Amino acid sequence: MKTLALSVLIALLAGAASAPGSPVEHGGDWPSSTPEEQGMDGRVIEALSREFADGRHGYVDGMLVVRHGHVVFEASYRHDYAKLFEGKGPGGMYNYYDPDWHPYYRGSDLHTLQSVSKSVTSALVGIAIARGELPGVDAKVSRYFEGFRVGEDPRRARTTLRDLLTMTSGIEWDEETVSYTDPRNSCAAMEASADWVQYVLDRPMAREPGEVFVYNSGVTVLLAQVLRSATGMQADDYAALHLLRPLGIERFYWKRTPTRVPDTEGGLYLAPRDLAKIGALYLNDGVWNGRRLLPEGWARESTAPRVETEPDAPRPVKYGYQWWALPDPKAASDPAFAAWGYGGQVLIVVPDEDVVAVFTGWNIYDKPSLSPLFALDRVLAAVRPPAAPRAE
């Protein structure tokens, strides 16, 4: 195992206490606390942190845990990505081995979110529906592609916004059998094309929309065009106006494609504390500091387990509207859900326990990406310590 240099920083910022589950009102940041003050076992969290520090889970570079609206743990684990990237090609924003772009944006603390960007894009769809710019999830999407070749397959004309959100578009696509660094990957081929929207529209239809889940980053790129056509704004500008800045997020970067369409499938960069705000927004039914940013019920609707993704798995994860629904047999009411991105970007929200957790990393080498189920179980172990043995 490669030697990993560790720098662990626990940043506990002073601030007035807020009500459980509520964002902080002062300065747009989070108040600090200890795990124990918020009903968590700090030893369990520290044990996981040591595993990350020891490199047991590959190149994990950050962990943040928020409970009852308080940061209870924050750590970073530094790796020499520049050295790891040596000899990996000419660079550029879509070369995953370019240390100027991956995993941090040009030496800043803004971290690539990869497919966590999809979940943020889903929030924009909800906002556009609430504002009357989109009629609803059952709207046919073909109307939003004026000026593009859409083909004559009648199945494409039947595709709805819901089909794109749930990745049941019916479009022929292979993003899972080969690595993202392999040009045979459909997503990699799209990212190498001159017009990403047209590339996706040029793919043939393989089945009826709404029938089968096929993980397809291209459909989220189509959502960028839907938003642009419906709102008159590019998705990144729309996000800044209606989502990010209302959350107090001023520092972010969102890549654009060669045709200047925002990379809604994987191009957003945020600092971990700001990503946690997205989780808190969904935890609180789309309300931030008393202001409703998402339509009422959209958070629950979009994170509900709607589509089977791996029905034969021992613990199958399901899909909602660009969010992953996580199986948690101990959940009393609302299940946990996650935004999940390539390389180990994980945002977990556990409504029953009032927990938001963020993990970042760049496991594109010799370790698998951090699993949301693994992260969920380890965080919940700190909330739900094992019961003491029963006396005989």
Image (cartoon, rainbow, N blue to C red):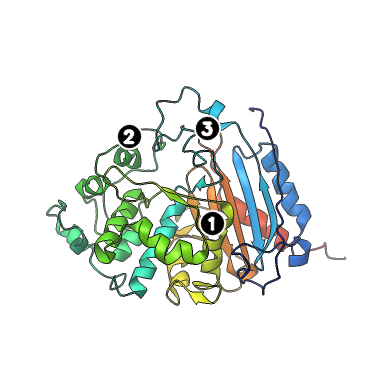
Callout 1 touching callout 3 (CB < 8 Å): no
Number of the label disc, if any, that sits on residue 275: 1
The circle drawn on residue 184 is 2
Place of residue 225 in the rendered image (x, y in percent of width and height, measured from the top left) = 27, 56
Q: Amino acid at mark 2?
A: Arg
The residue tagged with tag 2: helix, strand or loop? loop
Point out the image quarter for the C terminus.
bottom right
Q: For the view shown, which residue lies furthest in the right direction? A: 392
In this picture, residue 47 sits left or right of residue 86: right
Asked if 300 appears above or below 236 in the picture, the reply is: below
Of the two numbered discs 2 and 1 in the rendering, the one whose residue sits closer to the viewer: 1
The crowd level at tag 2 (other Cα within 10 Å; few <14, some 14-19, many 20+) is some
Instruction: State how far apart marks 2 and 3 are (Cα).
Output: 18 Å
Give the residue at mark 3: 365
Q: CA distance from mark 2 to mark 1?
A: 31 Å
Q: Which residue is nearer to you in this view: 91 or 371? A: 91
In terms of sequence position, does the residue under pointer 2 or pointer 3 come before the other? Answer: 2
Rendering coords of residue 75 (x, y %): 68, 48
Q: Which mark, by number, is residue 370?
A: none
* Amino acid on which disc 3 is placed: Tyr
